[in-house]
Amino acid sequence: MFNIKETYPIGIDFDDRHVYAAQFQQTRRGPAIRDLFYRKLDEPQVDSPEWEDALVAALKAASKNKRFRGKHAAIHLPARHISSFPITFGIDTAGTIDAAIARESRKHLSFPLENAVIDYSSLIEVSIGEKRTFNAHVVAAHRNQIDRHIRLLRRAGLSGETIDFDLSSLLRLHHHLYSPGNEPVVLCYIGQRQTLIAVVTADNILARRNTTWGIQGLLNRVETNLDLPGGGNQSAELLATYGLKYDAHIRSSGASDDTANETPGNGIAIFRTFFQILPPYVDVLVHELYQIFGYVRSNQSGIRFKKIFMYGQASSVAGLDQYLELHLGIPTEAINPLSTLNIADGNRFPDPGRGAAFALALGLALRKMTWL
């Protein structure tokens, strides 16, 4: 008789400069966060041998975390190593979906199809007849990059059991926090230098888009305009305090945009300064959202988006959700998973307010693994 066990892996999400890790444990209340781990990578030359050594050192530190259990890891490849694209294809009675996806993907890849690992995150049948037609969204990576990252995990004493795509992890976390409905919603994960945008329903991914917009652009603008040292915490703290809250601040003070004046204690000037610095860059994100909305509406006329859920670093910018809601006309909410997820008994995280950045690591960590 086989003894089958289900365990939670260590979910590890990393980019050029940051490593986030998380693990769950099963409790009577359901999955609860066992622990979180964070490490900043200071090696500037990304993908160099020195950068790999710094990454391995961070992964070793995570694997030796006394609160984590086991050495099984689930990871993402960094966004720069992922290709994603929509395709439309038809098949007749003699064709197969997998063969058609491979044929169409060949047109979009920058490397030979034989070297690609391909998955499709959504598949929608749009017409039925003698020749069936499908829309799909494909994600692909070069096999060498997958092998490379598995080797890096082994150097750190970890076993790479699963390599997941970022949207799969985000969906897993979102469906754990919210009951999926039939109306389309927008999921937006804001990272340090990359942002993932997806329009999804309970059963389908209608569109996804990756962009180079990230919170680092906002930090750079604050540091440049206020003559602050680069790479410090001061700009991040100012973003979290003032951000895009000028409109809300003057409303709470009883003034209007035309009449708002600086008086002792009301801080109008600093809020106004940030509202002058940030919107030109934030409006690039607004444009990216309009782009994906237009794509979805071109395929499904009359579609309405129920809500925008902002994950990742969105919570680090005060008023960002309100700004987007005002400019897009869609209810918008910035999500910090730590404010909702169960925490294992006895665990206390030093700064729960920074937990939003762990969203993808938490989504990875929720992927149960089955062992004999």
Image: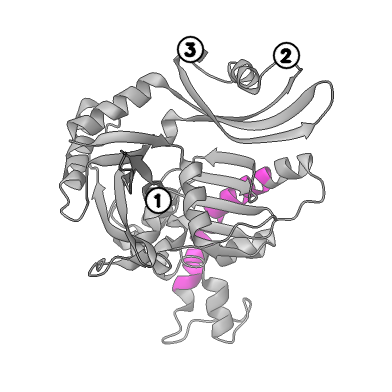
Q: Secondary structure at mark 1?
A: loop
Q: Secondary structure at mark 3?
A: helix
Q: Which mark is residue 94?
A: 2
**Which of the 4 quarters of the picture holds residue 86?**
top right
On screen, 245 above or below 229?
Answer: below
Residue at the outermost right position: 129
**Which of the 4 quarters of the picture holds residue 371?**
top left
* Position in image of residue 75 (x %, y %): 35, 39
Q: Which mark is residue 114?
A: 3
On screen, 16 above or below 185?
Answer: above
Q: Amino acid at mark 1?
A: Leu
Question: Badge 3 local density, few (<14 within 10 Å), some, or many (20+)?
Answer: few
Q: Earlier in the sequence, mark 2 or mark 1?
A: 2
Q: Which residues are magenta?
A: 270-292
* Position in image of residue 190 (x %, y %): 47, 50
Question: Badge 2 local density, few (<14 within 10 Å), some, or many (20+)?
Answer: few
On screen, 198 above or below 136?
Answer: below
Per the model, the C-alpha gap separating discs 2 and 1 is 39 Å
Q: Which mark is residue 219?
A: none
Q: Is residue 112 visible?
A: no
Q: Is residue 84 magenta?
A: no
Q: Which mark is residue 366?
A: 1
103 left or right of 340 in image: right
CB-based contact (under 8 Å), mark 2 and mark 3: no
Per the model, the C-alpha gap separating discs 2 and 3 is 23 Å
* Position in image of residue 131 (x %, y %): 80, 21
